[in-house]
Amino acid sequence: MLTSTESVFIVIAGVIGSLFFLALVNWLWPRDRRFAHNDQIGWQLSVLGTTYAVILGFMLYAVWTAFSEANSNVEFEANDLVSVYWLADGLPEPQRTQLRDLTRRYADVAINQDWPAMYAGQLPNASLAVNAEMWKVLISAKTATPTQSTAEDHALNELSSLTEHRRTRVMQSLSHLPPVLWWVLVVGGSVTIASACMFGSSNLVLHFLQVFALSLLIALGLVAIGEIHRPFQGSVHIPNYAFVRAQQNMQGP
C-alpha cells in the first residue's frame, strides 16, 4: 500500500538513481571504450527491453483487470442489497420490517466498518453478522399468498447473490501480488536500465535523456502496479460510493 507521497518519492528516487548509475558507468568505463561493444550491448538491450516491456505491460493489465473486477463486484453487491430491500415489501410482517431494517444496517456497516477494515488490510467481518441475520429472517418468513411466495423466492435469489459477492469482496480485499512477481518486476527493470547505461553514446546529453525517459517510464509502471494491486487500499482504491447510493435508494418507510 503506497501513499501519494511515497509514490512520488519512488519515481524520483528511481530516476535519480538511474542517472547516477549512468554517471558512475561513464566515470569507471569511459564512453569511447564502450563504442566497440555497442553491437553486443545493443542486441542485449533490445532483447531485455522487449522482454521487460511485455512483462511490465502484462502485469499492469492484470492488476488493472483485477481492480476493475473488484469494482464491478462491489456494484453488484450493492445492487443485490437494494433488490432485497424492495423485495421485502412482498413479505408478511414482521419479516418485512426486519429485513428492510437489516438491509439498511448492512449498508451502514459496509460503509463505516467494512471499508475502514479493508483499507487497513483486515478482514471485513462486520457485514458477515448482518448477512447471517438476513438469512435467518428471510427463511423464517411464513408466506400465505402466491405474491408473498414469489417475493420470498426472488429475495432468496438476491440474498444468495449478495452473499456470494460479499465473499468475493473479502477475497479481493486480501489479494496481492506475490513477492516473486515483485522481484521479477524490480530486478527486470534494474537490469534493463543498467543495460541502457552501458551503451556507448557519442552524445552524452542525449544518452542522459534516454536513460531518464526509460527509468521514468519503468518507475511510473511499477508505481502504478503498486497503487492498484490492492484494490481496497492505498491512495488509489475502490470507494464505498456504491453503498452510499444504496443507502439513498433505501430511504423509504
Image: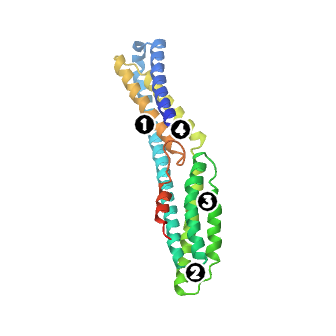
Which percent across, then down, holds residue 42?
Answer: 40, 26
Residue 172 in view, yes or no: no
Q: Earlier in the sequence, mark 3 or mark 1?
A: 1
Residue type, numbered disc 3: Ser
Residue at (63%, 73%) from the top-left corner? 137
Which residue has dot 2 on it?
92
For mark 3, does the 10 Å Cα neighbourhood hold few (<14), some (14 to 19), or many (20 or more) residues?
Answer: many
Rounded to the nearest angstrom, the CA distance separating label 3 from label 4 is 26 Å
In this image, 112 relative to 208: left or right? Answer: right
Secondary structure of the residue carrying tag 4 is loop
Residue type, numbered disc 1: Thr
Residue at (47%, 40%) from the top-left corner? 224
Q: Are marks 3 and 1 in contact (CB under 8 Å)?
A: no
Rounded to the nearest angstrom, the CA distance separating label 2 from label 3 is 25 Å
The number of numbered badges drawn on the structure is 4
Rounded to the nearest angstrom, the CA distance separating label 1 from label 2 is 65 Å
Which percent across, then down, holds residue 234?
Answer: 53, 42
In this image, 163 relative to 224: left or right? Answer: right
Return the mark for residue 127. 3
Q: Earlier in the sequence, mark 4 or mark 2?
A: 4
Which residue has dot 1 on it?
50
Residue at (55%, 55%) from the top-left corner? 111
Q: Earlier in the sequence, mark 1 or mark 2?
A: 1
